[in-house]
Amino acid sequence: MRKKTMTTNAQITTVAEHGETVFIPLNKLKKHPKNARKTPHSEASIEGKAASIAAKGMLQNLVVEPEANAEGEPTGFYLVSVGEGRRLAQLLRVKRKEIKKTEPIRCVIDTANDAAEISLDENVNRENLHPADEFERFRELSENRGWGAEEIAARFGKSAHVVKQRLRLGAVSPKLIQVYRDGGLTMDQLQAFAITDDHDRQEQVFENLSHNREPWIIRRDLTACNVAASDRRAVFVGAEVYTEAGGNIIRDLFTEDRGGFYEDAALLDRLALDKLERTAAEVQEAEGWKWASAYIDWPHAHGMRRTYPQPVELSEEQEAAYEAAQEELERLSAEWQDADADLPPEVDQRLAELEAEIERIDGLRYAYDPDEITRGGVFVVLNHDGEARIERGFIRAEDEAPEPEEAESADGGTIIDGVRVNADGEIIGEDGEYDEDGNHVSALDAEDEEAEEDGKPLSDSLIRDLTAHRTLALRLALGEQPDMALIAVIHALAAQTFYRGGGDAHALEIRPISASLGGHADGIEDTAAAKALADRHAGWAADMPRDVADLWGFIAGLDHASVMALFAHCAVQTVNALKLPWEQNKRHAHATADRLATAVALDMTAHWTPTVRAYFGRVTKAHILDAVREALGDEAAERIADKKKPEMAEAAEQLLAGTGWLPPILRTERPAWLAVDEQPEAPAMEDEPFAVAAE
């Protein structure tokens, strides 16, 4: 074989011999018409080769043969039999102005072999590197050379994301990589193990896998002790604060992980509680409450009475400021209501300032009693949306206002508010020491003694006799006056719903019992329905008289619509439609709850939506498919039937969004009066839900 020579433009007409290595200008190279590859190289492949050549040069020469014209004379060009991809990569570098079009390219002359055969041979007799070997070599480059994903990507013409994926796979436990080499794991399963760098944890999960080795199960088991980035604690604390505190966020580079998983749940809880406690301290200092407590979850068993703000009179200055703001807001709104374009920034800002001022002054119309603030406290809890939720006005038992002052008299009686009574609550006035008002007297003449005999309390037996007759008469009379009976019922309910010790302030033996729902449905207190009910309750509480003794007059003075609204609000506090596994004897109560839902035309689509978290992630794949099939038909169900459960649940959530589908237990039977004269186009689902507004 001849000595390697450099072929220049001047020498191009000289035909090199077979087997000779020469350098040929790039613009003198052409694709061989006999090249076996008819399907073009992908752009990604050309990009990768260009990056590799730029970083490391041409590691492999091209195989070429001289081009000849029809007469057999050399044209000065060379046809590339082997290495067409590298030629295209160099042309891409010319386009990018990295090299000139005359860049000399190392080539080997081949005039003996058939070009079609050697082109085919190059691609057929080649075995790709095993993926595991590739992953480990990428990891070694990172560890031994100190190269990051971006630098490795630039040298191999890959995206940084792809390199990060391969580095992550290369970091999987060597034991599991060997299992993958031996065919014991699929690529999808290996990718699932790569969600964490903890080799011990990876191997532990692998050893505990059953026959079901779905990737989603592997990911679930690996992240069982971690917290998803969508969790309210993670949202509240934030990724930056968590990582600065030493926490690690693990990311799944092979699926949509929505921000990853927070590895240290205990650290996240501590950071969330610290932030809540800071908020609680700020509220306590700013508003003067006796105490403020922070919790991640609502403390259902606090057992405290709650107070609410009461109406207060605004000062003349505040009323004047409110009226001025209202007038200016109305004037500006009228002035710009017909404007075609957007409002000028200064006008828009002024409108926002006026609305904020009106809202601020409105907030001053209700305030907590200063005494309640000095005795009461605040709960600061973490809301479902990752925001701090502040609930005020809770009074601990030890901080309740004292009962009326009692004192023991010298003769064993008890003085209550200055009146001496015996153990039965009867006023003591014997022996001339106290009159019936409890006032001490030094002596009584005969005329006073006679007066005392006249004022002697009635016996207990007689009092019971007389009040029994009165109770009977009250029952008869109240039964003949339904409107007054309604007031009496409302009074009994409201006294116990809104007042401390209200159970002794009414004449009807009615006891409202309210089942707590927080322990049965996680986060139910944070729903829109719970907020609306709490706001309604707070509104009534703010309007109630401070003293329960004034409650009757308050209720009696309401108009009929307000009376009925208060009655309804008190009644709803006692509704219980819970189905609990240990309550097997409430079949009739559940049936009544169903009838009640029908009677009020309950539309659960306004309060509940089937999501992965609320439903699909908590039922079987069969239930998911049944739901999609029922709402959208067999075709829609078949489209997701082959998906893994997490993917199926997410797909079902998207498919059923806006359809109004509900699980049977949440459906309301259509009232008979709504079904009259209806002729549906197609048979409706059993217990079909319905929207009240649509009716």
Image (spheres, rainbow, N blue to C red):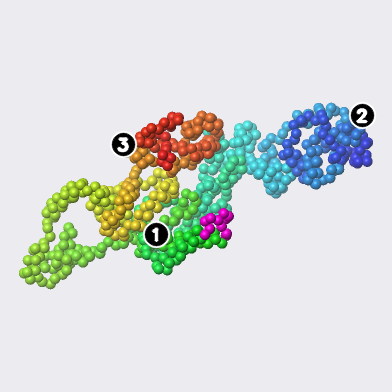
The residue under the point 22% across, 65% down is: 417
The residue under the point 48% across, 63% down is: 328
* Residue 364 point in image, percent of width and height: 41, 62
Instruction: Describe the element under mark 3 as helix, strand or loop.
Output: helix
In the rendered structure, which disc, 3 or 1, sits on the residue that comes first in sequence? 1
Q: Does 151 sit left or right of 334 as displayed? A: right
* Residue 685 point in image, percent of width and height: 43, 32
Classify 10 Å Cα crowding around label 3: few (below 14), some (14-19), many (20 and above). few
Q: Does 399 sit left or right of 87 as displayed? A: left
- Residue under pointer 1: 377
Which residue is at the front of the view, 638 or 177?
638
Question: Can residue 139 be spotted in the picture?
Answer: no
Q: Per the image, is 342 magenta?
A: yes
How many marks can you see?
3
* Residue 425 point in image, percent of width and height: 18, 59
- Residue under pointer 2: 72
Q: Which residues lie in the magenta part?
A: 335-345
CA gap between label 2 and label 3 equals 103 Å
Which residue is at the front of the view, 516 or 168?
516
Q: Per the image, is 76 magenta?
A: no
CB contact under 8 Å: marks 3 and 1: no
Kind of residue sitting beneath label 3: His
Kind of residue sitting beneath label 1: Gly
Q: Does 479 sit left or right of 151 as displayed? A: left
- Residue under pointer 3: 588
